[in-house]
Image (cartoon, rainbow, N blue to C red):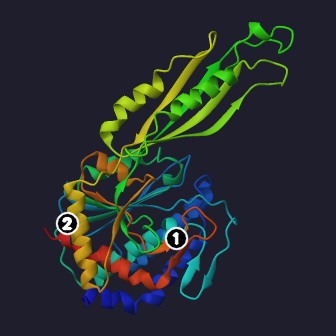
Amino acid sequence: MSIILNYLKEQQEAITETLFKLTESESPSIKKVLVDRCGEVLREEFEQLIGGTVEVIEKTEVGNQYKFTYGEGDETNQVLVIGHMDTVWDEGALPIRKEGNILYGPGVFDMKGGLTITLWAIKALKENNVKLNKKITFLVTTDEEIGSEHSKEIILEEAQKSSVVFIPESSIAPDGAVKTERKGAGQFSMKIEGISAHAGINAWDGASAIEELAYQILDLKKLANRQEGISINVGTVSGGTRVNVIAKEAAADIDVRITKKAQAQALVKKIMDRPSFIEGTRIEINGKIERYPLERTDAVIQLYKDLKEIAASHGYELGEGSSGGASDGNFTAWLGIPTIDGLGPVGDGAHSDHEHVDLTNLPYRAALLAEIILKYAVH
């Protein structure tokens, strides 16, 4: 068993305490004051455990973001770890409770657990006097759950200075497999303008925006392809004013997922260039692919093989898999930077009321991250 894993197993109670602190500091994406409070807790933990350097990236619309750095090295050849402290949970929406070795709570799996193991992975490298040739940068954002609009720029900036990127997002349940693939994601809004008329007196003079929307939804769904990993979901619809008025307006929001960057151009064109089915209606569509896929490239496969070898030395087999959800790792993968995701601890229930983490796994996952960082930070 490795020296680093032994050290982290001895710190089990302290690692658990860090996770408790971060989970108790609730941080819903849309509540800046709460996210900022969580950021201060995270900062205190980093400074107490590691020291290092802290840079606060102040934001007005979302919580302040943080860039933590440890070690020295070329500014253009760092090892980058990216996490987020915001969660999907409103304050008080989900109770925090411990049952045996399982901790339940808001964001504990997605991704306070990942933040915790990152802090302790770096702490383990420090305490074991590991010599690094590259700087470690730990970037923590605050709007990942709402699209990363306010953090995308800094993510891309730091990625371009990095040789490799590790994402300690939630692992694949139930066994903790890492994510070697993630779908890309895009969002589109469709607005339809029709011609209003009295539904009884002038029924044939109108052009229903709602009926046009119905045709459009059915036609959009034809673009989905399960075999190619393309999914289309119309998540919200609205329209009309009264039951006896032919609808002048209707709208829909559309979620698109892809598995290959090559799919994007043709798919977006088919979504944007849409003829109307009902004469007299007009269609307006806005949107884009916001995150391109994290694809299972040769570089990603090599990262997985390295992780699998480390896990085997710790006494267990590490699996791999894909995710239909996107993360900030999609941005770095799009730049061509070797990126692997799902390095967070074993758990389950992201975005659900049974969200939880296996506390006994924390030292193992922190050791896994520490040793993969070590492998890439000494070359």
Extreme-left residue of the structure: 379
Q: Give the residue at mark 2.
A: 134
The location of residue 219, given as percent across then percent down, is 53, 28
Q: Which mark is residue 348?
A: 1
Q: Quadrant of residue 306?
A: bottom left
Which mark is on residue 358? none
User: Could you give the CA–CA distance between mark 2 and mark 1, rounded to whole angstroms?
Assistant: 33 Å
Look at the numbered disc 1 and give the secondary structure of its residue. Answer: strand
Q: Quadrant of the N terminus?
A: bottom left
Q: Quadrant of residue 119?
A: bottom left
Residue neighbourhood size for the residue with mark 2, other residues' Cα within 10 Å, grouped as few (<14), some (14–19), many (≥20): many
| 94 lies left or right of 311 | right
Placement of the C terminus among the 4 image quadrants: bottom left
Q: Please tell me how crowded label 1 is: few (under 14), some (14-19), or many (20+) other residues with Cα within 10 Å.
A: many
Given residues 140 and 301, the one toward you in this image is 301
Left or right of 190? Residue 80 is: left
Q: Is residue 74 visible?
A: yes
Q: Write the residue at 43% across / 45% down.
A: 226
Q: Identify the residue shown where x is 47% and y is 48%.
A: 148
Q: Is residue 371 above or below residue 338?
A: below
Residue visible at 50% across and 62% down?
Answer: 85
Of the numbered discs 2 and 1, the one sitting upstream in the chain is 2
